Amino acid sequence: MRKKIFLAAALFWTGVILFFCLENAKDIPQINIPYIDKVVHAIFHFVFTTLWFLYFKKKLSSSIIVQPLTWSFVFSLLFGISIELMQQYITLTRSADVIDVLANTVGASLVVITILLLNARTRIVDKI
């Protein structure tokens, strides 16, 4: 049951990211805070990586967190790169940005660090 819930949440969040990253840039309100878009990218991928980790953990029925953590991290990186390529080649109002990929990687990396630290201290991830 949890596996289906985690999958639904991960797919929903994937759709949210796709929508906002491929939306016409003119339709997105402009906020004049330096680098806010990079923070948003990091948050998007923090949540993305977390949700996919939870799904992969259940899907793989793994007691070891390294494999689902690796899968979710790599998936996040590939998804982020794919979105940047889609922005460059499919949309008319967006362009690819290597710094966005870096921000995505920061968000995904923070998940890896957080999960490893939480698991080392509390073993809470094993109970999921």
Image (cartoon, rainbow, N blue to C red):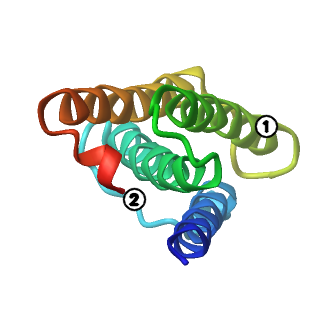
Where does residue 98 sit, x and y in percent of width and height? 59, 21
Which image quadrant is residue 38 in?
A: top left
In primary-sequence order, the first of circles 1 and 2 is 2
What residue type is disc 1 on? Answer: Gln
- For residue 30, which numbered disc appears in the image? 2
Q: Nearer the viewer, residue 21 or 10?
A: 10
Which image quadrant is residue 30 in?
A: bottom left
In this picture, is 42 found above or below 120? below
Classify mark 2: residues with Cα within 10 Å, few (<14), some (14-19) or many (20+).
Answer: few
- For residue 88, which numbered disc appears in the image? 1
Q: Nearer the viewer, residue 16 or 3?
A: 3
Q: In the rendered view of the protein, which quadrant contains the C terminus?
A: bottom left
Between label 1 and label 2, give the one nearer the viewer: 1
Direction from residue 29 to residue 91 in the image, left or right: right
Q: Residue at horizontal 62%, vertical 33%?
A: 71
Q: Residue at horizontal 87%, vertical 48%?
A: 90
